[in-house]
Amino acid sequence: MAKAATKVPSWISKILLPEIRSIVKEEISSEVKVLDARISALDSKLEERTKSLDSKLEERFKALDSKMEERFKLLDLKIAALDSKLEERFKALDSKLEEKTKSSDSKLEERTKTLENEISSLRNEMLSLRNEMNARFDSIEKRLPLIERLAQIESRLERLEKQAELGK
């Protein structure tokens, strides 16, 4: 309108333009009131819908929270049950392991004692053969079978001592 006012002579702009403005305002004001009423009605409907959706969402959230809480409690119970089962199994395995260890230890001790006794008897036999060799035979030809027997006993004795060391 400002551009139109510059092209119109000044007397027209002073008299007609304010009149035209007031007419346009009157004509439009009723339409503006109708539009304002429609907008406010839409606003109130939108607000009601938003409130109802908010309440529904809040109810759903509460329901989900309670379901989650129940499931967490069930999971906690399951975890506790599994923990107790695992604890029982570990105790059973520990007792079995302890029994087997004791059994292996006793077998090892028996084997060690057997080897020690065998080593002792071989040493006694060697000593006996040496004494016999020194006492009875005066020539090397007569001593040779006894020396071979002593070498065999000594090699067997060394093997047994190695086994005994590995067993310890």
Image: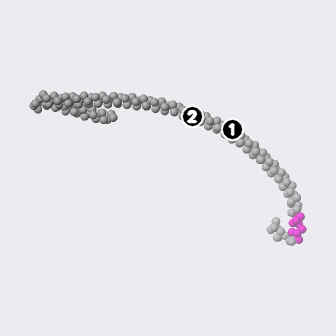
Q: Which mark is residue 80?
A: 2
Compare residues 35 and 162 and report the one nearer the observer: 162
Extreme left residue here? 139
Q: Disc 2 vs disc 1: Cβ atoms closer than 8 Å? A: no
Q: Is residue 2 above or below residue 100?
A: below
Residue 125 lies in quadrant? top left
Q: Is residue 37 above or below residue 142?
A: below
Callout 2 environment at 10 Å: few (<14), some (14 to 19), or many (20+)? few
Residue 8: % across, % down: 84, 70
Q: In the drawing, does residue 21 fall left or right of residue 123?
A: right
- On whether residue 15 falls in the magenta region, the answer is yes
Please, what is the three-letter code of the amino acid marked with disc 2?
Ala
Q: In the picture, which quadrant includes the N terminus?
A: bottom right
Q: Residue at x 49, y 31 (%)?
A: 91
Residue 148 lies in quadrant? top left
Compare residues 82 and 130 and report the one nearer the observer: 130
Q: Secondary structure at mark 2?
A: helix
Residue 161: % across, % down: 27, 34
Residue underneath mark 1:
63
